[in-house]
Amino acid sequence: MAERAIPSKLPVVPKELERIPLVQNQRGFAWISDRIAGVAEGKTPLWWWMAFVPSLSFATLLLCMLAYQISTGVGVWGDMRPVMWGWDIINFVWWIGIGHAGTLISAILFLLRQRWRTGVNRAAEAMTIFAVMCAGIYPAMHVGRVWFDWWLFPIPNSNGPIWPQFRSPLMWDVFAVSTYFTVSLLFWYMGLIPDLAVMRDRAKTRPRQFLYGLFALGWTGSNRHWSNYEKAYLLLAGLSTPLVLSVHSIVSLDFAVSQLPGWHTTIFPPYFVAGAIYSGFGMVLTLLVPLRKICKLEEVITLRHIDVMCKVTLATGSIVGYAYAMEYFIAWYSGNPYERWTFWHRIFGTYWYGGAAMLGFNALVPQLFWFKWFRQNLVAVFVISILINIGMWFERFVIIVGSLYQDFLPSSWGYFKPTWVDICTFLGTFGLFFTLFLLFLRFLPLIAISEVKGVTPQADPHHLLGGAKHEEPEPDDEVTL
Amino acid sequence: MNGVSSHPYGVMAEFSTPAAVMHAAEKVRDAGFTRWDVFTPFPVHGMDRAMGLKNSKVGWFAFLGGVAGYTCGMVMIWFMNDLNYHIVVGGKPMFSPYAAFPPSYELTILFGAFGSLFGMLFLNRLPRLHHPLLKNRRFGSVTHDRFFIVIECSDPKYSEPGTRRLLEEAGSKQIEVVEE
């Protein structure tokens, strides 16, 4: 086959059709590995320590709180009749919801061939894994006698054996969450294998060469390997998609299968999934908007990436808003006085502020993303992403506490207040989350290097730039992609 | 490389763009080599066809994993809640496929995911913690920005000058013999 002529200039695209390329300034392969791997190499920067020390302190606080809780009993939390699910289950649902954006980005957007996902998927998947870890702490502790946690698993015990009771949604949850954690970890690790090989080949010291080499499993970049690897990646994406949709559906069944007004609704599974993805994107934006600046990765996590993530937030936030509207409509339309009472008291009851935060931050605030100005303004995006996280926390507060504190019998009504242990445990999970995330930033490539290389124009052998080896663009080059 | 105990592993040719390595791969394929491979920093689209590779078999491992997971879930729940020890809850049946479905569904995905990852590792004969190419200094840039074709000495069509000539004609400027 004859050598292909490489045109020095590409056809110029009309200005209104121009898009920000996935890697800006036509950076070459070498630049991509140097810049991304560079974040995890060299001297530890000061900002990292400034973030790590407080995170680790809060993680230690978490350990102290858990030790206190285990040694004293669940009574140290504010859970008290009739509200037996308090901050523990709120935080469990909140954290696990956050994880969902990572799987959406890594699996669903992969199946939908959204090539921009390569810039953000690694960090989002790491976020998923660490968020699920934080979530998992709560139900494990909430059972009270932590040393009997193994009764949740299908392991024979000495009483019969009495096996787990599989007609309970709580048992389904055990399987959903543990599968979710395991599969997310496998998916993340598999994506890391080629990048660990990058780190291995760049490593200067023996321990780094050994450790990266060990975990890279002897990856050589062989095309026979890539062929199986890509198929396995596709399959994992295909398996993770129904997984992520099922996990929060099953979490929602913990509520929906009961008879309580505010919980007993069929809309819960899709409503919870949309809310989970919405809150997860909030957290992805909270993490990546500052990170791309601190780590100087603006050319790989471009404004286009931020823009599309804001659009996903807008879409899922609107689905959540629709679900809220539908819940209110059904509460009225059902004619059920208990149902109407619960929903009326969500906005006008004791915990009116929770309902206000939920409706305001989840249904109204994301509507700002209709405007390009908000999607392009990083300060606005950051502030909105924090509001989303707060709003989604209050959504779970409203659902859980709001339905429990006033049920059918006024004589059993109560009032829920968190204790200092509740608050410190929650702060502690943030410490754990950020400690793990910072360690990830410091030791692993936070962007999928090989995947980003694969979506650059020069990576495609059939692209007009296919044979071109262009490190830096010529100053007067009219190349527009 | 003391010259006494060294055995050649194969001939390695370096390329600097995906298009170049792909055209070269087509030539090596057409020359009828079987024990050879292309090494790239990222999967290059169309390379499987350029090398004449068949569709990957990982899907079978994932499928078998999924079937095993679903069966395992259903049988486990039936055994535990119906056969081995009855727990009566609200007059519900001891075993119902509906209540058993969610955990079985999760186990389908779990075992399917194990099948994909471990099937991929098995087909690739990984983990492999030693490889002749990984000792080669120049080969280190395969994870950076370079592309390589390696033809192994164990290939029946291998002859050092012939292989070298083929790779030179295919456009490589950097060709060397890699030691075992």
Image: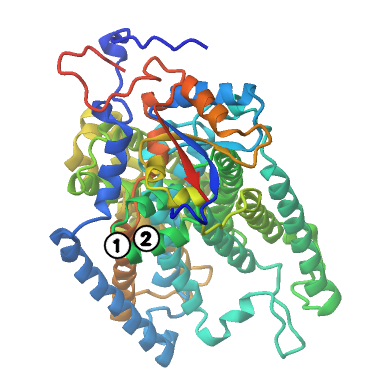
Q: Quadrant of residue A231?
A: top right
> Residue A263, image x and y in percent?
53, 59
**Tag 1, which chain?**
A
The residue sitting at 52% across, 28% down in the picture is: B45
> Residue A439, image x and y in percent?
31, 63
Q: In which quarter of the image is residue B173?
A: top left
Which quadrant is home to the C terminus of chain A?
top left
Above-or-below relation of A368 to A275: above
* Distance between the alpha carbons at the discs numbered 2 and 1: 6 Å
Judge whether residue A219 can be spotted in this image.
no
Numbered circle sitting on residue A205: 1
Above-or-below relation of A192 to A82: above
Judge whether residue B172 can be spotted in this image.
yes
Taking A232 as reference, is B57 left or right? right
Taking A383 as reference, is A194 left or right? right
Local SS, label 1:
loop
Q: Mark 2 points at which residue?
A: A209
- Categorize mark 2 by other alpha carbons within 10 Å: few (<14), some (14-19), many (20+): some
In the image, A96 versus A6, the foreground residue is: A6
Specify the amino acid type for callout 2.
Gln
- Categorize mark 1 by other alpha carbons within 10 Å: few (<14), some (14-19), many (20+): few
Specify the amino acid type for callout 1.
Thr
Local SS, label 2:
helix
Whether residues under marks 2 and 1 lie with C-beta atoms below 8 angstroms apart, the answer is yes
> Residue A244, image x and y in percent?
54, 50
Above-or-below relation of B12 to A48: above
> Residue A377, image x and y in percent?
19, 35
The residue sitting at 45% across, 68% down in the picture is: A89
